[in-house]
Amino acid sequence: MIDRNQQWRLARTPPAGWPQADDFAWHEVPCPEPASGQLVSRTIYLSLDPYQWGRRRSGVEKPGDVCHGRTVSQVVKSRHADYAEGDYLFNTNGWQAFGLTGRDISNFGYMHPRRIDPGIAPISTAVGVLGMLGLTAYSGLIIQCQPRAGETVVVSAASGGVGQVAGQLARLKGCRVVGVTSTPEKCAFVRDELKFDSAVSHLANDFEAQLASACPDGIDIYFENVGGKVYEGVLPLLNRGARITICGMISQYGNTDGRNAGELWMATGKPYFDRLGVQAHSLFVGNFVADHQARFLIEMAEWLKEGAIVYREDIWSGLEHAPSAFMAMLKGGNFGKTLVAVAKDPTRT
Ligand SMILES: NC(=O)c1ccc[n+]([C@@H]2O[C@H](COP(=O)([O-])OP(=O)(O)OC[C@H]3O[C@@H](n4cnc5c(N)ncnc54)[C@H](OP(=O)(O)O)[C@@H]3O)[C@@H](O)[C@H]2O)c1
C-alpha cells in the first residue's frame, strides 16, 4: 500500500555561486494516481548530474518544481499498454520517491523512457555507464575525436561518471591515456582499476610539469570536463591537428562574476588552436541520441559483459541526502558516478 510521496522541490531560484541547502525544500504529498496511458513508478536510483545545476541556475527549473533528475525505477501501478507492474525502466521521475510516466507527462526531454533488462547489467547502470553518461563519453571521444591507436588522450575528471568511461574507451582504441583527477585514492583508481597509463593530480603544486612528463609525445585528444587550471595545463602540450571535445567545464559552474565560461575558454585557447589547427567540438549528448544511442547500448553492454569496461558508482543512501550529495559532487566530493539509492534495489542481493 503506497499513500505518501516524498519530494525535493526547488525552494528558490538559486543565487549566483554554488548550490546551498536553502535551495531545496522537502515535501510530503499524496502519491500520484495514473490516468489512462500512464504509470506510477517507484524511484530506485536517482542520478545526480552537473547539468541539473545549470537548469536551476538558469531558471529552466522554477521554484516549486520537483527537482529534475533521471531515474531507474520500478512500475508499481500501470495503466500504460507497454508496461506492467514490476517492470524496470529508465525514466525521469526527478528527486522524488514516486513519479508518473506516460501520456501527457513530458518531463523526459531528449531521453525517452525505456525498459531496462536487469539481465544485461545492474539496473543502476541505466543512468550511468549504460545511459546518458556513457553515451556522452562515447559521442565525445569516439564520434567527435576519432581516436587512432598510439595517440595520447588526456581526460579530466577522470575518476568521475563521464571521465572513467571516456578514458577506457580511448584505451580500447589503443591510445595512451592520461587521467587528471584529485586525490591519491582517485589517482590510484584511475591507474590500477581503469588501467589508464598515467594519472596526474590537479591539486599538485607542479601539476603542469607532472602533466607534461605524463605526455612525452604531447596531447592529440583532450576530453574536457573541467576547464580552468587543467585546461590551461593542457594547452601548451597540444599537438598539431589535436582534437578537443568540450564536454563540460565544471570548475566554472559556480562563477559569480558574470563571465561567460565558454567564451573565455575559446579566447584562452584560440592562439593555440589557430597555430596548431586544433579542432574543438562542442558536445551536447542530446544531439547523439537519435543516431547513436541504439548502437551505443549494444556495444557498451558487450564491453561490460566482457569486463572490457569497468565502472565505479558513488551511491548515497536515502532521498533525504540528495541535496548534500549534489553539492558534494559539484566540488569533487564524489568518487565515481553519483547516485542516490531512493528505494531498495530488488535486483541486488
Ligand atoms: N556535454 C554533455 O552533453 C554532457 C553530458 C553529461 C555530463 N557533462 C559534463 O561532464 C562533466 C563530468 O560530469 P559527470 O556527471 O561525469 O560528473 P563527475 O565527473 O562524476 O563529477 C564531477 C567531477 O568534477 C571534478 N571537479 C570538480 N571541480 C573541479 C575543479 N575545480 N577542477 C578540476 N576538477 C573538478 C571532480 O573530480 P576530481 O576529484 O577529479 O577533481 C568531480 O568528481 C561535467 O562537466 C558535466 O557538466 C556534459
Image (tube, rainbow, N blue to C red):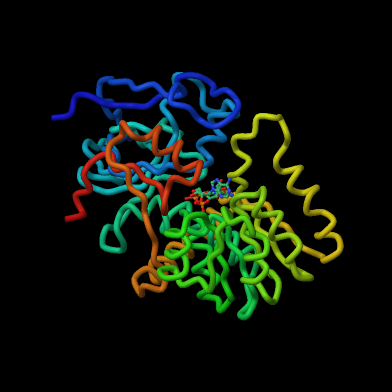
Locate the C terminus by quadrant.
bottom left
Q: Position of residue 79 (x, y in %)?
A: 26, 35
Residue sitting at 50 percent across and 19 percent down?
12
Is 193 left, or right, of 264 in this rendering?
Answer: left
Q: Is residue 299 above or below residue 283?
A: below
Count the numbered circles shown.
0
User: Residue lying farthest left?
Assistant: 1
Locate the N terminus by quadrant.
top left
Q: Is residue 228 above or below residue 208?
A: above
Q: Which one is nearer the viewer's eye here, 208 or 262? A: 208
Q: Position of residue 284 (x, y in %)?
A: 60, 49
User: Residue lying farthest front?
Assistant: 205
Residue sitting at 63 percent across and 41 percent down?
252
Residue sitting at 42 percent across and 24 percent down?
24
Is 294 left, or right, of 81 in this rendering?
Answer: right
Q: Which one is nearer the viewer's eye here, 234 or 296? A: 234
Q: Which image quadrant for residue 43? A: top left
Visible in this render: residue 65? no
Q: Which image quadrant for residue 320? A: top left
Is 145 left, or right, of 106 in this rendering?
Answer: right
Q: Position of residue 253 (x, y in %)?
A: 60, 38
Q: Is residue 171 above or below residue 79?
A: below
Visible in this render: residue 328? yes
Q: Which one is nearer the viewer's eye here, 262 or 127? A: 262
Q: Which one is nearer the viewer's eye here, 36 or 39? A: 39
Q: Position of residue 335 (x, y in %)?
A: 41, 52
